[in-house]
Amino acid sequence: MNASQRSARNAYAGLGLDRAHARRSDAVWLDTAREDACTRFVLTLPDTKLWANATGDALQWLDAAALDAGQRARASLLGLDAAGVAYFQVVGAKAPAGPGQAQGLRALAAGADAFHAGLAAYAAALAHWQRTSRYCPACGAATEHDDGGHRARCPRCGLSQFPRTDPAVIVLVEHADAALLGRKPGWPRERFSTLAGFVEPGETLEDAVRREIAEESGAVIRACDYHSSQPWPFPASLMLGFTAQATSRALAAGDGELAEVRWFTRAELRAGLADGSLSLPPGFSVAYHLIADWLEQTH
Ligand SMILES: [Zn+2]
């Protein structure tokens, strides 16, 4: 399995939408598409919720007739599907009339297919960025969103902001037949996951892997390899999964971010999962796949 195939298993990663960059600056095309009866509008609601169907396992599209002229004019272009149908994101303050329900992003990841989960993540992340880019960070003036909703431009000083994504590394550290897993404060006693942290300015991904593991566990990393990636819109992360090899199983007191960090052999982990004394992150996460892939290897 290659990295593309591994990434495609992670929730929010299998969207396959044509993002239609060239259309974002085509005002005539955008206005026509926003009025087209075939266009599908994804409604984002507060608290990273989206408008979903009655069973909560797919997005519930709205059509142009369900929106007022102001909502249509502010709708942001997400892209085009293989049939040429346009998808827009629209921000709502409350649930609309008609069938459906507000559904959380995590529940959609667990229950929806790759296209719906990926579109939900994309729409929610764009909505979050739009909410947090209303003012120019340089001069404080109110910004204007254009480029199909993908740019916030300052009319006073001309600064442009674009949707940001914060890279974070998430790492399965191994040494011989053992993996290093941690438990965050507040998690159930039996829950363990891979170690993770944000990439800092001026840092390579490999440097971030070494630093984060050292900070959280004291383990020294000899080498690391890319595994897969996952959009993680809580609110704006991109998880970059790695496997890493430690020089030994020596650990030191961490920075307090984790309540517990320890080595598990495959036999210990398998036994704990079997008898319920250990649990893993949800199956839609890159963390789960990092651990599951390692468990499947025979050392
Ligand atoms: Zn400005």
Image (cartoon, rainbow, N blue to C red):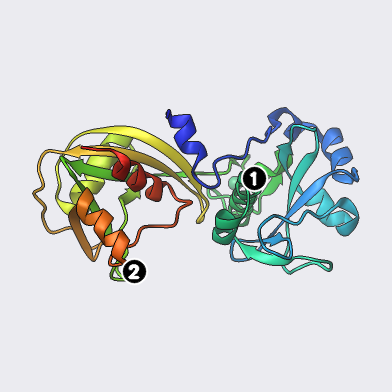
**For residue 190, above or below residue 179:** below
The residue under the point 71% across, 31% down is 20
* Mark closest to the chain's N terminus, 1 or 2: 1
Q: Nearer the viewer, mark 1 or mark 2?
A: 2
Foreground of the two, 98 or 73:
98
**Regarding mark 1 in the picture, which secondary structure is present there?**
loop
Q: CA distance from mark 1 to mark 2?
A: 43 Å
Beta carbon at label 1 within 8 Å of ligand 1? yes
Query: Is residue 167 visible in this depiction of the protein?
Result: yes
Amino acid of disc 1: Cys
- In the picture provided, is 162 more to the left or to the right than 294? right
In the drawing, does residue 166 fall left or right of residue 260?
right
The quadrant of the image that shows the C terminus is top left
* Residue 180 position within the rendered picture, expressed as x and y whole percent measured from the top left: 22, 50
Identify which residue is drawn at 29% across, 65% down. Answer: 275
Residue behind mark 2: 187
